[in-house]
Image (tube, helix red, strand yellow):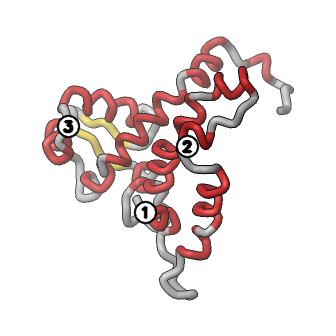
Amino acid sequence: MNTEGMEKFSAQTTLEFATSYQASRAIYVVAKLDIPDFLKDGRRSASELAIATKTNAEALYRVLRCVAGHGILEEQPERKFGLTSLGKTLCRDAPDSVRAYTIFVHEELYQCWGDIEAAVRTGEPRFEKVIGVPRFALSVRIIKLPLNCYVTFETPCNSMQSLGT
């Protein structure tokens, strides 16, 4: 890592790095609940989205505000939210959708990082213990994505959709 100019970083920067998992998890929840797809046709209130997703309106509102703070959604008056261009990448049918991959990372790989202290203490890989399959088996699934993501050789499909989420 190039440390030139690092003196401008502060404790605030370190805290932002240390808490970035919160935004990542909130983005995962928004993707998993299909919030961007519910917003494709226009702004909706947190209460409307809670009804559509069968979630708690207050809890969902807090998650939506977190995600809006990172540019995925746009918060409007009266607790309404709209979709940003960044948020569109979490729509199921977006040509550059990362929805399935976001869900995959959080459901399949996130736990390994949550157990990183044990890996560092013992030197033992945690992947198979946490995930339940050898890392190779999951790696093969990921490597095959480019091969499996064509409807025809002329028509690529949404490559992340082929993960099955």
- Indicate the quadrant where residue 115 lies: top right
Q: Is 76 left, or right, of 134 in this rendering?
A: left
Compare marks 3 and 1 and give the one earlier in the sequence.
3
Compare marks 1 and 2 and give the one earlier in the sequence.
2
What mark, if any, has residue 121 been given in the picture?
Answer: none
- Circle 2 crowding by C-alpha within 10 Å: few under 14, some 14–19, many from 20: some
For disc 3, the marked residue is 55
Foreground label between 3 and 1: 1
- Indicate the quadrant where residue 60 lies: top left
Amino acid type of the residue that numbered disc 3 sits on in the rendered structure: Thr
Alpha carbons under labels 1 and 2: distance apart: 15 Å
For disc 2, the marked residue is 109
Query: In terms of depth relative to the viewer, which is nearer, 31 or 115?
Result: 115
Amino acid type of the residue that numbered disc 2 sits on in the rendered structure: Leu
- Residue 164 on image: x %, y %: 43, 63
Determine contact: label 3, label 2, CB under 8 Å: no
Q: Judging from the image, what secondary structure is the residue with disc 3 in? A: loop
Q: Quadrant of the N terminus?
A: top right
Compare marks 3 and 2 and give the one earlier in the sequence.
3
- Residue 113 on image: x %, y %: 60, 33
- Residue 8 on image: x %, y %: 74, 18
Q: Judging from the image, what secondary structure is the residue with disc 2 in? A: helix
For disc 1, the marked residue is 164
